[in-house]
Image (spheres, rainbow, N blue to C red):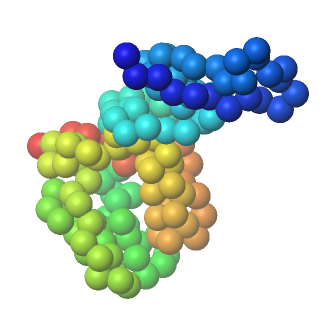
Amino acid sequence: MQSVVLPLSAGQAKPACRTKVVSCAWATALCPALSGAAVAADTSATEQLQRWTVEAKAPGNADKGKVFFNAKHGGEWSCASCHNAPPTTEGKHANTGKAIAPLPPAFNAKAFTEVAKLDKWFRRNCKDVLSRECTAAEKADVMAYLTQLK
């Protein structure tokens, strides 16, 4: 069995053996929860759609999500500017030219599997497109649109 050494918390008394060793499985399950860190494959598109549906207090609407995804919202970019319309093929960042993997989970198994990456992606890209963060309803609508693409 593998083990991991956990650091002591501030103010925590030192155990007699100077370190506390716990099983790797326990540490893997507990440490991300304690630190707030996300781990690979810690979520799914369905779970994220549910998360924003609950926060928005309304189910995501794929039709609204499609309109939102393709609209420029008064700026020069839309989500589709970099991710394509529909976003089922590799896109390209409008400024850097960097390749962007397809968004729908049916076309990209890694899509929406890490909470921290997804939150960062929405925060950054919504600010680029809208000049503000997206609302929970907008996120639910976009997720409903992306998850229904097959």
Which is nearer the eye, 74 or 33? 33
Instruction: Please state the total of marks drawn on the protein image.
Output: 0
Which is nearer the eye, 38 or 60? 38
> Which residue appears at 49% of the width and 46% of the height?
116
Question: Which image quarter is the C terminus in?
Answer: top left
Q: Can residue 70 be seen in this view?
A: yes
Q: Is 7 left, or right, of 39 in this rendering?
A: right
Q: Is 80 left, or right, of 115 in this rendering?
A: left
Q: Is residue 85 visible?
A: no
> Which residue appears at 34% of the width and 43% of the height?
112
Q: Which residue lies furthest to the front in this view?
A: 17
Up-down relation of residue 136 to residue 87 (above or below): above
**Residue 75, how many percent across, how many down?**
48, 78
Q: Is 19 left, or right, of 143 in this rendering?
A: right
**Residue 144, how many percent across, how many down?**
32, 40
Up-down relation of residue 43 to residue 93 (above or below): above
Which is nearer the eye, 39 or 94? 39
**Residue 126, how many percent across, how many down?**
50, 62
Q: Quadrant of residue 59?
A: top left
> Which residue appears at 62% of the width and 28% of the height?
6
Up-down relation of residue 83 to residue 13 (above or below): below
**Residue 15, how many percent across, how many down?**
76, 16
Question: Which image quarter is the N terminus in?
Answer: top left
> Which residue appears at 60% of the width and 64% of the height?
132
